[in-house]
Image (spheres, rainbow, N blue to C red):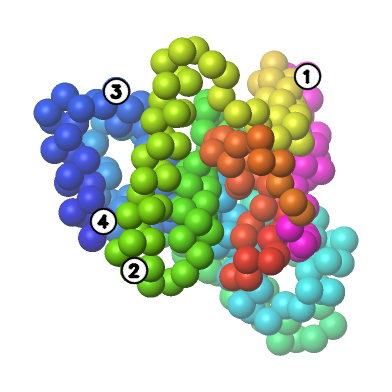
Amino acid sequence: MAEVYVGACASRVNSGFNARWFEQGNTTDLELAAIIAFKAKFPNAQNKACLFHFAQALMRRFTAANFLKKEYEEPIVNTWFRRLFCLSLVPIDHITDEWTKILNEKPIFDQDDKNNKLDEFLEYFVNTYFEGQLEMDLWNHFDTEGPRTNNDIEGYNLKLKNHVSRAHPDIYKSIEVFQVQETTSFVKYKHALDGKPAPPRRKFNIGRDNEIKFYKKLFIEGNIGIDVYVSHLLLLFSFLKNKKKNQDPNVSDSSDDDEFENAIKSDSEDEEEEL
């Protein structure tokens, strides 16, 4: 399926349609078939993995190892897990040193089976993100300028799902949904042509993004070291589960980092895990 979709995109590009978008780069889920297909069809485009899905994959693998919520919320374990995630935001040439620190600071549990499970989790990380087909430059976003996720698409999919409100809509409901989406898309397009501003991002995410840029600049200029840089990154992510709050209808759900850096969605629509 991924090959068919990417092939269709390539055909549109070859015909001159929206070629600039594909030349600039692409952000995909951690789906190997899609990643390989994009590399094959767009060899000169930069391909990046969505950080939302990178964090989600780590969290799901960690919880699948039977670590309880109370164990994860222990400050030592929580900080250690966030440090592991922050490998995605440090320079690639510093990853080896940071990985060594992660191994040296590995939490020690009273139960041997927990320690064995943690070792299996680390082995999974090595096999997948160091020695597997998901190369470092795919999931590392230190040099990324612009979107680090594909959650504008995820946000649209969720909005469409909520609007349909049923698993198997009949033809009349489907037509109604398509009509609403067509009208909404036309209005947004007209606003863009008229130069009207896009819906605002959440202030919290704007602030967090600015902090990442600020500390990154200090690090690049040599004003702070890698340890200080990482320590500030750790404060920006929590991975703690919270109930969803009512969202301002005037706030966009399609900004680049908003959905990723604000939440990892759980299987329940009533909960989300803040990132």
What is the secondary structure assignment of the residue under circle 2? Answer: loop
**Amino acid type, residue under disc 1 in the picture:** Asn
Q: Which mark is residue 223?
A: 1
Q: Residues within 10 Å of mark 1 (few under 14, many from 20)?
A: few
Q: Residue at x 61, y 46 (%)?
A: 259
The front one of 258 and 198 is 198
Q: Is residue 247 above or below residue 188?
A: below
Mark 4 = which residue? 2
Q: Quadrant of the N terminus?
A: bottom left
**Amino acid type, residue under disc 4 in the picture:** Ala
Q: Residues within 10 Å of mark 4 (few under 14, many from 20)?
A: some
Mark 3 = which residue? 20
Q: Is residue 21 above or below residue 271?
A: above
Q: CA distance from mark 1 to mark 3?
A: 37 Å
- The magenta span reads 222-244
Q: Could you say which quadrant of the image residue 79 lies in?
A: bottom right
Q: Which mark is residue 170?
A: 2
Q: Residue at x 26, y 56 (%)?
A: 2
Q: CA distance from mark 2 to mark 1?
A: 61 Å
Q: CA distance from mark 2 to mark 3?
A: 38 Å
What is the secondary structure assignment of the residue under circle 3? Answer: helix
Q: Residue at x 43, y 56 (%)?
A: 30
Q: Is residue 226 left or right of residue 127?
A: right
**Amino acid type, residue under disc 3 in the picture:** Arg
Q: CA distance from mark 4 to mark 2?
A: 27 Å
Q: Is residue 101 above or below residue 271?
A: above
Q: Residues within 10 Å of mark 2 (few under 14, many from 20)?
A: few
Which of the two labelled residues, at mark 2 and mark 3, occupies the earlier sequence position?
Answer: 3
**Amino acid type, residue under disc 2 in the picture:** Asp
